[in-house]
Amino acid sequence: MKLVRAEDATRFENAESCVAYEYETGDLDINIARIEIVGRYPLEGFAVNTQVTELVYVESGRGQVCVDGIVHAINKGDVLSIQKGEKVSWNGTMTLVIACAPTWTPEQYEQHS
C-alpha cells in the first residue's frame, strides 16, 4: 500500500485555465490526478492521450467536454470513460478526478490546434 497525502501531490499549471495535482504512487499500471478547470482547456484545439484510457469523475462544477467533435454537457457526479486516441477539450468550471491506465506520462500526451 502507498498513501499519498493531498499536501504531497505535485502541482502543475498546464494553462491559465487548468491546474493539475498529480498523486505519485509509483504504480506503472494506473495513476490519478485532480484537475481544476476554469474556462477552456486546452485553450485552442484539442488534446489526445495516445496510450491511456482515462476514467473521469466530475467531483464538482459543470461544463462541457467535446470528444471527437461531439459536445456533451457534464455535471457534478458524472463519470466519463475516454479512450486512448480520442480528441478531447473541456470548457466550464469544474474539478475532475482522473485515473489513467496505464500510468499517464507527458510523452504520450499531445495538443493540437
Image (cartoon, rainbow, N blue to C red):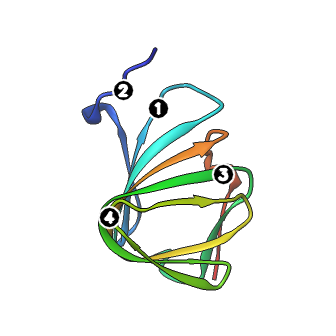
Gap between marks 2 and 1 measured at Cα = 7 Å
Foreground mark, 4 or 1, reads 4
Gap between marks 3 and 4 measured at Cα = 21 Å
**Pointers 3 and 1 in contact (CB under 8 A)?**
no
Q: Residues within 10 Å of mark 1 (few under 14, many from 20)?
A: some
Specify which label sits upstream in the sequence, 2 or 1: 2
Specify which label sits upstream in the sequence, 2 or 4: 2
Amino acid type, callout 4:
Lys
Amino acid type, callout 3:
Thr
Gap between marks 4 and 1 measured at Cα = 25 Å
Residue located at (65% from left, 85% from top): 69
Label 1 sits on residue: 24
Q: Residues within 10 Å of mark 2 (few under 14, many from 20)?
A: few
Label 4 sits on residue: 76
In the rendered structure, find residue 4 and report the number of the disc placed on it.
2
**Pointers 2 and 1 in contact (CB under 8 A)?**
yes
Gap between marks 3 and 1 measured at Cα = 18 Å
Residue located at (59% from left, 58% from top): 81
